[in-house]
Image (cartoon, helix red, strand yellow):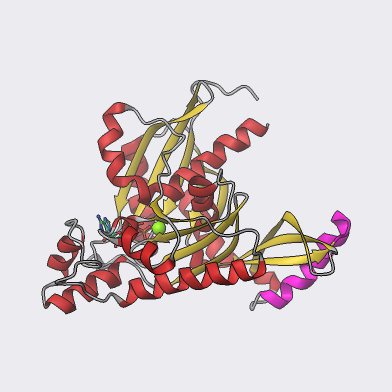
Amino acid sequence: MKMFAKERFLGVDFGTESIKAVELGVRGGKPFVSNYGEALLFSGQGKNTATRSLREEIAIRFRSLLDRMHPDTNEVCISMPSFLGLISLIDFPEMTEAELEEAVQFEARKYIPSPLEDVALSWEAVGDTHDSEKAKKTEVLLVAALNKDVHQYESYVNVVGYDMKLLELETFSIARSLAGNEPDPVLVVDIGARAANLILVENGFPKKSRSIDSGGRDITRTLAESLNISIDRADEMKKSGKDFLNAKDIAIIFPPVETIVSEAKRMIVSWEEKRPSRTVKKLILSGGTGRLAGLVEYTSKKVGVPVVIGNPFEGVSVPSELDAQIDQLGASFSAAIGLALYGIRSAEKK
Ligand SMILES: Nc1ncnc2c1ncn2[C@@H]1O[C@H](COP(=O)(O)OP(=O)(O)OP(=O)(O)O)[C@@H](O)[C@H]1O
Ligand SMILES: [Mg+2]
């Protein structure tokens, strides 16, 4: 389709620590950032000093973020946290589309612990594989989330009077912005405030994913306990750029980092055991905690693959006045960018 110069695409990531929003336009066939914003939900350790519930807080902060940004569109693509969903990759023998539909519904019961009527279910055929007898199989990615959680996120959009173009698990948004064009399998490790998402992406699809309850807050807590300092001071030190992970004199063991890194290693080993010809070439760090000083070096030493900090703005132009700020924000905006990119791609398909 012809993309209109004024058309805008809005992506919003509802994170634990903050809501992040990006608005993209398209110029000369290339996306550019026309607007962005972030609304902090809570201070560092998730302390809620207000008397409002988390849901009320999110709704209020979302509205004021939009008031500040004044987006040039009223359509929005949003994500919900990975830990609210379930993603399974299932192999089916080759069959027709209609047979597959039926087979997926039947199989879904085995993978989903809740009654299917309580669940929003979607699936997509993402590739073909061959088993040891060389029989052709269709790989299906099954995604499920509880209706009540889906409705909750829909309601954030409804109350501000916007139209929801897409609601997806952040796993998909992050995979799209950081590994959408990777020719080889890569492992994306997004570490936020509360949780870490490990996403093995092949051909742009998250083929395996895990969500772990370890994140930046736990790292701050470890630092505070190890150095016997306050949480606020530890949070400051964590972001100061000092490398506590690799330093010879004061290296501290961070159990949350150990958990994430050993799970990353385990996922790569288990993937490569099944697909020896499709080795994982790279580990991409994302999320605010992806910027933790020394994490690139530490992870590559422990996991044994090259590690980089993902840049969701690669392939997206950034106006020069935003350049420096975006450099700081980069890694934590990967889900928001991935959502806005979805808007662009679906408009291009029309
Ligand atoms: N320079 C830095 N070094 C280390 N940690 C940082 C840095 N900047 C931010 N963080 C940490 O990143 C975390 C916030 O990351 P992010 O914005 O990705 O989280 P979120 O998306 O809101 O949370 P979640 O994904 O867990 O729901 C916080 O714990 C913050 O302390
Ligand atoms: Mg996040």
Magenta residues: mostly which secondary structure?
Answer: helix
The image quadrant in which ligand 1 is located:
bottom left
> In this figure, what is the number of numbered marks?
0
Q: Residue 32's quadrant in the figure?
A: top left
Q: Is residue 100 left or right of residue 29?
A: right
Residue 210 screen position, x and y as percent: 52, 69
Q: Is residue 158 visible?
A: no
Residue at 12 percent across and 66 percent down: it is 233
User: Looking at the image, is 307 positioned above or below residue 27?
Assistant: below
Residue 135 screen position, x and y as percent: 85, 64
User: Looking at the image, is 227 positioned above or below residue 216?
Assistant: below
Residue at 17 percent across and 78 percent down: it is 226
Q: Nearer the viewer, residue 122 or 137?
A: 137
Residue at 55 percent across and 70 percent down: it is 269
Residue 277 screen position, x and y as percent: 65, 59
Residue at 47 percent across and 68 percent down: it is 264
Q: Say which quadrant the C terminus sits in.
A: top right
Residue 100 covered by magenta stretch? yes
Residue 165 screen position, x and y as percent: 57, 44
Q: Is residue 300 visible?
A: yes
Q: Is residue 242 left or right of residue 302?
A: left
Q: Which residues are magenta?
A: 94-111
User: Looking at the image, is 350 positioned above or below residue 11?
Assistant: above
Q: Say which quadrant the N terminus sits in.
A: top right
